[in-house]
Amino acid sequence: MNIVIFGAGGHGRVVLDILKHDRRVNLAGFIDDNRNSHQKIIDGVRVLGDVTRLPELIAAHNLDGCVVAIGDNKVRAKLFAKVKHLGLKLENAIHPNALIAKDVEIGEGVVIASGAIINTGTRIGNNVIINTGVVIDHNNIIEDNVHISPGAKLAGEVTVKKYAHVGIGVTVVPHLTIGESAVVGAGAVVQEDIPDDSTAVGVPARVIKSKKKS
């Protein structure tokens, strides 16, 4: 299948490395809105242009699908919706070194990087990033448009609601909820629920910023 990667930055290169392990994939190139990157060759793959060129690129390269490789949850969600509207399939990029229980449910447009461990009973929504070395224990629920950063560890029966960002090296104890659009700072140890639209940092994690919905 012919696919493109949205985003030619660092995360895009990680996704490219993952897809190089998938023999089904023919990489047509990157798409990136940074004009300075256009026509550059990144790890052997050309940057074809920005998102406005997508309709013509679909025809020119007979594209079947894409992976959105952008860390920002809201930006990634907008691109996910745009690509879906254009009829491209949102492919999963799953590294062969990831260990995933057979009953784990995985949505579309999901990136699971090298060294990730995902245990039984877990459900992963659409457009999710499970980054390098993440550990997700049993019966977790990871909702749409979430980013779990490298080295984070989630114990059993944790729920991460949509658009949340769990920072690098975070630890979450069992039975907790990380709220919608919440941010948990690097290295935090989460011992109680984190509310929607809040930022929590520290050991133990404490909310330092909260955006109340009107």
Image (spheres, rainbow, N blue to C red):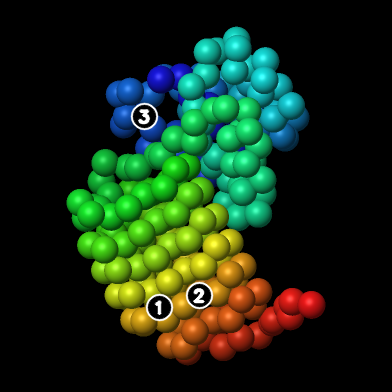
Query: Of the numbered discs in the image, which one, if any, rests on residue 20?
Result: 3
For the residues labelled 2 and 1, the Cα–Cα distance comes to 9 Å
Q: Quadrant of residue 191?
A: bottom left
Which residue ends up furthest to the right in the rendered image?
214
Q: First in sequence: mark 3 or mark 1?
A: 3
Q: Is residue 30 left or right of residue 1?
A: right
Q: First in sequence: mark 2 or mark 3?
A: 3
Asked if labels 1 and 2 touch by Cβ distance under 8 angstroms, the answer is yes
Q: First in sequence: mark 2 or mark 1?
A: 1
Identify which residue is drawn at 46% across, 88% down. Answer: 192
Spot occupied by residue 199 in the image (x, y as percentages of width and height): 62, 77
Query: Of the numbered discs in the image, which one, if any, rests on residue 172?
Result: 1
**What amino acid type is highlighted by mark number 1?**
Val
What kind of element bears circle 2? strand
For the residues labelled 3 and 1, the Cα–Cα distance comes to 32 Å
**Is residue 213 visible from the viewing direction of this image?**
yes
Q: Quadrant of the C terminus?
A: bottom right
